Amino acid sequence: MDINELRGIHTLVLMAVFIGIIWWAFSAHRKKANEEAAHLPFDDDEVERRTLEQEKTEKKQ
């Protein structure tokens, strides 16, 4: 077994790991977690409150 065979085996193992991660990320049981993560930027009430306070102070000036 030479270095090129090891490189080929290494490539196949990494490709299998990559496909496994993709399968896991897009599987049906991850749908709820993915939807929650997609809505995180819109759920931040603290940012909205700071933005409203900043707009109020800018209007006063």
Image (cartoon, rainbow, N blue to C red):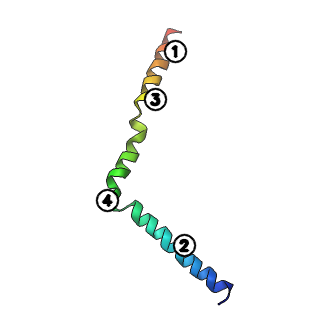
Neighbourhood count class around disc 1 (C-alpha, 10 Å): few under 14, some 14–19, many 20 upward: few
Q: Residue furthest top?
A: 60
The amino acid beneath tag 4 is His
Q: Nearer the viewer, residue 25 or 60?
A: 25
Neighbourhood count class around disc 3 (C-alpha, 10 Å): few under 14, some 14–19, many 20 upward: few
**Of helix, strand and loop, which one carries label 2?**
helix
Disc 4 designates what residue? Answer: 29
Which comes before the other along the chain, label 4 or label 1? 4
Disc 2 designates what residue? Answer: 14
Check whether the beta carbons of the residues at disc 2 and disc 3 lie within 8 A of each other. no
From the viewer's perspective, is the residue at label 4 or at label 1 nearer?
4
| Residue that appears at 49% across and 68% down | 18
**Of helix, strand and loop, which one carries label 1?**
helix
- For the C terminus, the quadrant is top right
Q: CA distance from mark 3 to mark 1?
A: 16 Å
| Residue that appears at 53% across and 76% down | 13
Disc 3 designates what residue? Answer: 47
**Residue 32 image position (x, y, % from top left):** 32, 51
**Residue 41 image position (x, y, % from top left):** 43, 39
The amino acid beneath tag 3 is Val
Check whether the beta carbons of the residues at disc 2 and disc 1 lie within 8 A of each other. no
